[in-house]
């Protein structure tokens, strides 16, 4: 039999390499950070190779470490999968992070359809507005206007245009041929007014001396405010599509424009961790977008 490294040290290294963090590896394995560090050093001594480069709190893999991790990581995942199967716990849980508005108005209402097609895959859906609020390494899939983190593959969901939306009773009073007619109503902004400023530039109209601009920190809130029938918000198909289809909101799509920061992307892990399940989710999301 081939000479085997100490398995406890291999497990400590695999968790550290996956998280690139001693502290997160320690939390996962329910041991101290010093115990993790000791086990990794013991493995390096056993192999006679440096596996990790430590630069303060930052950790990176050496060439040998990356080679070793690619094998042991896959082996431990396979052991975990067959263990789940033998113990009747065969479901895989994908950890999904989505921007709050996108998750609430588009993804969550459709997740039941995913589970119906893939009953063997569970999902955990978390929401945040800013990428600084969470660690991308804790997730398999990210959906939002964020840039792709290291180790993730990125796909734009689609070219997303923004346009004014309002309740039907407001729509009936607007001159739909004149974008300036919108100024007679409160304008709801989720970008400190810069979204409407760019809209005015695109329409070739000047901002009037007095505009009733009302501010929200989420486009979801400005959209919901428009549903009550008093003012006008800027939205797009992902967030406002279902409300428009139901007739609760009317869209002025001929007044649309492209908001520079308003494009949504799907980022997914490039590693082999839950690769088939991740591929199934990515394909399902892509098909949902294409169908709409």
Image: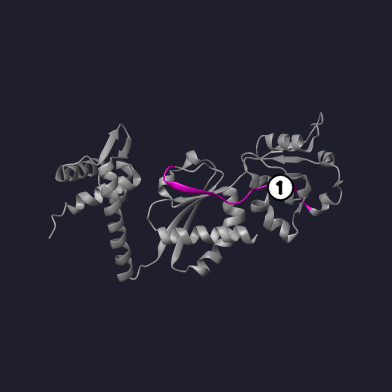
Locate residue 3, reporting x and y percent. 13, 55
Classify residue 185 by image quadrant.
top right
Please give the name of the residue rendered at 73% of the width and 48% of the height, measured from the top-left corner.
Answer: 226
Locate residue 234, reporting x and y percent. 71, 44
77 left or right of 279 in image = left
28 left or right of 285 in image = left
Q: Is residue 219 visible?
A: yes
Please give the name of the residue rendered at 65% of the width and 45% of the height, measured from the top-left corner.
Answer: 219
Q: Mark 1 — residue?
A: 225
Q: Is residue 222 magenta?
A: no
Q: Quadrant of the N terminus?
A: bottom left
Residue nearest the observer in this picture, 103 or 55? 55
Q: Residue furthest top?
A: 209
40 left or right of 215 in image = left
The correct choice, above or below, for 108 with respect to 152 in the image is below
Locate residue 248, reporting x and y percent. 74, 57
Please give the name of the residue rendered at 37% of the width and 67% of the height, measured from the top-left corner.
Answer: 90
Q: Quadrant of the C terminus?
A: bottom right
Locate residue 144, reporting x and y percent. 55, 47
Residue nearest the observer in this picture, 169 or 165? 165
- Counting the numbered discs, the total is 1
Q: Secondary structure at mark 1?
A: helix
Q: Is residue 87 visible?
A: no
The correct choice, above or below, for 215 with respect to 291 in the image is above
Classify residue 84 by image quadrant.
bottom left
Q: Which residues are magenta?
A: 150-167
How is this picture coloured? one colour
């Amino acid at each position: 039999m081939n000479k085997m490294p100490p398995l406890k040290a291999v497990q400590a290294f695999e968790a550290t390499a996956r998280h690139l963090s001693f502290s997160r590896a320690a939390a996962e394995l329910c041991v101290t950070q010093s115990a993790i560090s000791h086990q990794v050093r013991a493995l390096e001594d056993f192999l006679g190779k440096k596996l990790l480069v430590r630069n303060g709190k930052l950790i990176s893999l050496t060439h040998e470490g990356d080679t070793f991790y690619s094998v042991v990581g896959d082996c431990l995942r396979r052991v975990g999968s067959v263990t789940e199967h033998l113990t009747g716990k065969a479901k895989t849980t994908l950890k999904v992070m989505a921007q709050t508005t996108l998750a609430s108005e588009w993804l969550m209402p459709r997740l039941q359809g995913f589970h119906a097609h893939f009953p063997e895959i569970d999902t955990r859906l978390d929401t945040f507005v800013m990428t600084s609020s969470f660690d991308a390494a804790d997730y398999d899939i990210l959906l939002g206007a964020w840039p792709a983190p290291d180790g993730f593959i990125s796909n734009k969901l689609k070219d997303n245009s923004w346009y004014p939306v309002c309740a039907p009773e407001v729509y009936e009073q607007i001159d739909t041929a004149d974008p300036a007619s919108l100024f007679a109503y409160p304008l709801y902004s989720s970008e400190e007014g810069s979204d409407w400023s760019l809209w005015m530039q695109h329409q070739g109209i000047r901002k009037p001396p007095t505009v009733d601009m009302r501010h929200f920190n989420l486009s979801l809130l400005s959209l919901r405010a428009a549903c009550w029938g008093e003012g006008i918000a800027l939205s797009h198909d992902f967030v406002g599509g279902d409300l428009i289809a139901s007739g609760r909101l009317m869209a002025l799509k001929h007044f649309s424009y492209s908001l520079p920061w308003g494009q949504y992307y799907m980022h997914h892990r490039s590693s082999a961790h839950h690769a088939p399940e991740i591929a199934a989710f990515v394909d399902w999301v892509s098909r949902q977008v294409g169908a709409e």
